[in-house]
Amino acid sequence: MRNLKTIVLLLLLTALPAFAANIKNGEELIAAMHKKYTGKWYKTLTFVQKTTNYKPDGTTQVSTWYEAMSVPGKLRIDILPLENGNGIMFLDNVVYSFNKGALVRSSPRIHPLLVLGFDVYAQPVEKTVKLLKDLNIDLSILHEDTWQGKPVYVVGAKSGDLTTPQFWIDKKNLYFVRLIEPAGKDKKQIAETQFNKYQKVKGGGWVSAEVIFNVDGKTTTTEDYSDIQTDVKLDERLFDPQKWSEADKTYVQKKN
């Protein structure tokens, strides 16, 4: 009986995936995240987003956005009403803004939520690591904690430090759940982003159906996703800043 128990234990240990090993730093965690979902993560994603902004006077402003993503590195946001031609595009670490169908400005920007929530699973580990370092996250620091009752890895800050740039990863599913970073012109505010209500989607991978943005502990914006679709065929022009108004928006029309 003792030998049988030993054999069963050995089988269980050898069956554990590589990412379940002791992870010592952020680079190892990024590698584990990538390995867990290599070839299993969706390539495109579309959804309807209800955006609620909370004003200092207690009132709210609600808008609807249609979003399309091509992983890695591409996100298009069309803000209703569509006929106004307003929106935003994130493309390979540059953000583009559109008004009345015309490109009005562009600037370099690493979007940490794209990197940690999506791109990490589809782009080389080395690229993700570089982008996170460029965001001033110290990948050499890692500790374990609990978030919403579940064990997590925390990268970038020591236990108890909730001001230094850091990201939190669900230990079981290896998806992103929390980002903390300095905010404001003087960097004296603390911004927190939460990815909540994860849904497992068709074809593999996950989508957080609720995103919450807090500044100094107060909620400033919430995003609620509906009509979530993965691996939708998308017109490549959707992610071309020079063809903002020319792109085929069939995926949007189906949502109307």
Image (spheres, grey):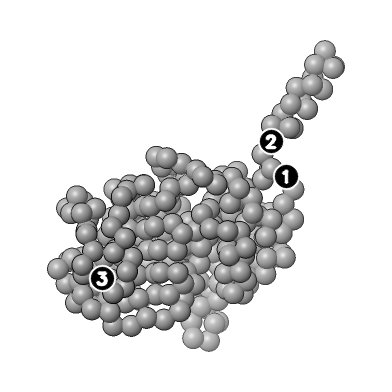
Residue closer to the observer: 195 or 69? 69
Is 180 left or right of 79, judged from the image as shown?
right
Q: Quick one: label 1 or label 2, which is nearer the N terminus?
A: 2
The amino acid type of the residue labelled 3 equals Lys
Circle 2/circle 3 CB separation < 8 Å: no
The residue that mark 3 highlights is 243
Is 140 left or right of 234, judged from the image as shown?
right
Is 99 left or right of 149, judged from the image as shown?
left
Q: Secondary structure at mark 2?
A: loop
The residue that mark 1 highlights is 21
What residue is drawn where x is 46% and y is 59%?
72
Badge 2: few (under 14), some or many (20 or more) residues near its Cα, within 10 Å? few
What residue is drawn where x is 64% and y is 50%?
32
What residue is drawn where x is 67% and y is 69%?
138
What residue is drawn where x is 62% and y is 63%?
126
Q: Secondary structure at mark 3?
A: helix
Separation of marks 1 and 3 at Cα, in angstroms: 46 Å
Q: Is residue 95 visible?
A: yes
Instruction: Give the image location of residue 90, x and y in percent.
Output: 39, 69
- Mark number, residue 16: 2
Instruction: Give the image location of residue 211, x and y in percent.
Output: 42, 58
Residue closer to the observer: 100 or 39? 39
182 above or below 18? below
24 above or below 110? above
Circle 1/circle 2 CB separation < 8 Å: yes
* Outermost residue to the left: 83
Q: Secondary structure at mark 1?
A: loop
The amino acid type of the residue labelled 1 equals Ala
